Image (spheres, grey):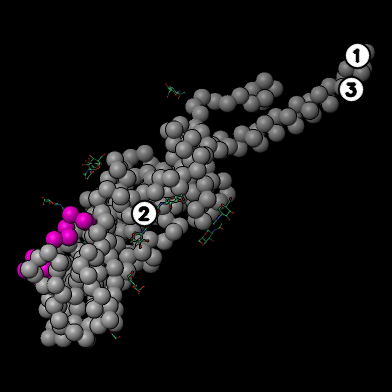
Amino acid sequence: MALSLRRRLPLLHLLLAIFAAASRGDDQSGEAYNTTICERQPYRCGEVNISYPFYLSDQTADIRGQNGSYCGYPGLGINCVGSKYPTLELDDYSYNVTHINYTDNTISLADPDVLDDESCPQVDHNVTVPSNMWLMNSTEHTVGFLFFFANCSTPTPIPVPGLSINITPIPCASPDGGGGGYSFAVPSYVPHQNLLQQCKDVFQVPVLQNASKIDQDWSTSGYRNILDLGFQLEVNSSQKSEQCNKCEESNGQCAYNRSGEFVGCLCDNGQVEDQECTNGSGNTLSDFY
Ligand SMILES: *[C@@H]1O[C@H](CO)[C@@H](O)[C@H](O)[C@H]1NC(C)=O
Ligand SMILES: *[C@@H]1O[C@H](CO)[C@@H](O)[C@H](O)[C@H]1NC(C)=O
Ligand SMILES: *[C@@H]1O[C@H](CO)[C@@H](O)[C@H](O)[C@H]1NC(C)=O
Ligand SMILES: *[C@@H]1O[C@H](CO)[C@@H](O)[C@H](O)[C@H]1NC(C)=O
Ligand SMILES: *[C@@H]1O[C@H](CO)[C@@H](O)[C@H](O)[C@H]1NC(C)=O
Ligand SMILES: *[C@@H]1O[C@H](CO)[C@@H](O)[C@H](O)[C@H]1NC(C)=O
Ligand SMILES: *[C@@H]1O[C@H](CO)[C@@H](O)[C@H](O)[C@H]1NC(C)=O
Ligand SMILES: *[C@@H]1O[C@H](CO)[C@@H](O)[C@H](O)[C@H]1NC(C)=O
Ligand SMILES: *[C@@H]1O[C@H](CO)[C@@H](O)[C@H](O)[C@H]1NC(C)=O
Ligand SMILES: *[C@@H]1O[C@H](CO)[C@@H](O)[C@H](O)[C@H]1NC(C)=O
Ligand SMILES: *[C@@H]1O[C@H](CO)[C@@H](O)[C@H](O)[C@H]1NC(C)=O
Ligand SMILES: *[C@@H]1O[C@H](CO)[C@@H](O)[C@H](O)[C@H]1NC(C)=O
């Protein structure tokens, strides 16, 4: 009897050890992460506070062995150029971030070519949002569009419906100003069929709707003032997975890897969980063993 018990004990130990190891394996969900990538305090870059679901694009770490993971939604990485100028990249173009509103989850952007060229701002590319970024046209505050026609063969002014006013070529961006052809800036609601035929290049940029007014000064200062205001995009939160929703409900922050896949829930206590942050220590068998 005593002998058989002594023989069985090692087996019992072995089983307990396996069980404990297995439960520690499950508990890998409670692995630690480098909390500098998910600071709860906003980071200030110039005039803009950056915090979740936005993040600093260089704040990445290995989370659960996934190289270059970050704390925030895909595509919301902000560069802080020279520790002063927040910028966001859309489709290989870098835009200055002028404001982030965390109440309605909008980000305000402006084209640096426009901001930094006071004398004669010209649009030379379309603003496009890549589909892997969790951003969309802002539903509330944007979205009017401005068409920028360049390399036009005609200086013929464009009539604005309902107003006794014509849109004339932009003086500084037309042949006398040294360009290759005439240029026009036209709000999207103004019919511009003939320009489509007369101009080699057309670009479309979003503007704040409120600003789509036209007066005598439109082709000199008017269009520039509107471009200076920039445009707004809104975080598309409906892209969030159930896991990420649960994570945020438990006061955690969602981490994604470089290809935009959810990798885990980053919790206040420095632990990574599958989806929910639990506070208090989980029991493991080793506590009893
Ligand atoms: C955490 O990340 C910061 C910034 O990248 C780094 O300086 C620090 O060494 C990291 N800490 C650990 C424990 O890896
Ligand atoms: C940025 O965050 C700090 C600290 O939370 C706050 O005092 C400041 O008013 C914020 N600034 C802006 C522009 O939101
Ligand atoms: C992580 O990704 C970076 C950028 O692609 C690469 O340079 C680096 O070698 C990767 N590190 C590991 C451990 O895979
Ligand atoms: C826009 O960002 C660039 C850095 O990419 C910076 O050099 C420029 O001064 C910024 N413009 C404004 C008006 O903040
Ligand atoms: C942020 O958005 C909210 C909701 O639309 C608005 O009430 C508030 O004025 C905005 N804040 C700023 C600083 O624009
Ligand atoms: C924003 O609206 C424009 C014009 O309707 C459209 O071409 C563009 O795809 C939209 N962008 C996004 C990110 O939805
Ligand atoms: C006008 O056309 C020329 C030659 O094709 C091109 O180099 C230039 O970038 C165009 N201008 C604009 C504003 O698109
Ligand atoms: C820019 O957008 C306009 C209007 O949507 C389109 O006609 C034009 O081909 C686009 N230009 C480029 C270079 O993609
Ligand atoms: C919107 O229009 C109002 C009244 O015309 C003006 O006071 C305000 O500055 C405008 N806002 C923007 C962002 O243009
Ligand atoms: C927001 O994301 C959802 C889910 O991916 C997508 O179906 C929807 O088209 C997006 N909305 C816009 C306006 O891009
Ligand atoms: C991101 O995670 C997905 C799913 O786990 C994986 O298939 C993909 O290779 C990962 N991407 C990177 C860059 O680690
Ligand atoms: C767990 O969370 C509750 C509610 O948020 C809080 O009151 C309590 O102090 C937390 N306990 C620990 C150990 O952090």
> In the rendered structure, which disc, 1 or 2, sits on the residue that comes first in sequence?
1
Q: Is residue 210 above or below residue 215?
A: above
Q: Position of residue 51 (x, y in %)?
A: 34, 44
Q: What SS does tag 2 mark?
A: strand
Q: Residue at x 38, y 53 (%)?
A: 135
Number of callouts in the render?
3
- Which residue is rendered at x = 45% and y = 31% of the image? 250
Give how far across and how far down residue 223 sits, in percent.
15, 67
**Crowdedness near tag 1: few (<14), some (14–19) or many (≥20) residues, C-alpha within 10 Å:** few
Q: Position of residue 63 (x, y in %)?
A: 53, 47
Q: Residue at x 38, y 67 (%)?
A: 92
Q: CA distance from mark 1 to mark 3?
A: 9 Å
Write the start and end of the magenta stretch as one range. 208-221
Given residues 57 and 220, the one toward you in this image is 220
Q: Amino acid at mark 3?
A: Arg
Q: Can residue 37 be seen in this snapshot?
A: no
CB-based contact (under 8 Å), mark 1 and mark 2? no
Disc sitting over residue 2 in the figure: 1
Q: Are marks 1 and 3 in contact (CB under 8 Å)?
A: no
Circle 1: element type: helix
Q: Circle 3 sits on which residue?
A: 7
In the image, taking residue 101 as reference, residue 246 lies left or right, namely right
Query: Is 164 part of what is drawn in magenta?
Result: no
Query: Which residue is identified by label 2?
Result: 136
Residue at far top of view? 1
Q: Earlier in the sequence, mark 1 or mark 3?
A: 1
Q: Is mark 2 within 8 Å of ligand 10?
A: yes
Mark closest to the chain's N terminus, 2 or 3: 3
State the quadrant of the C terminus: top right
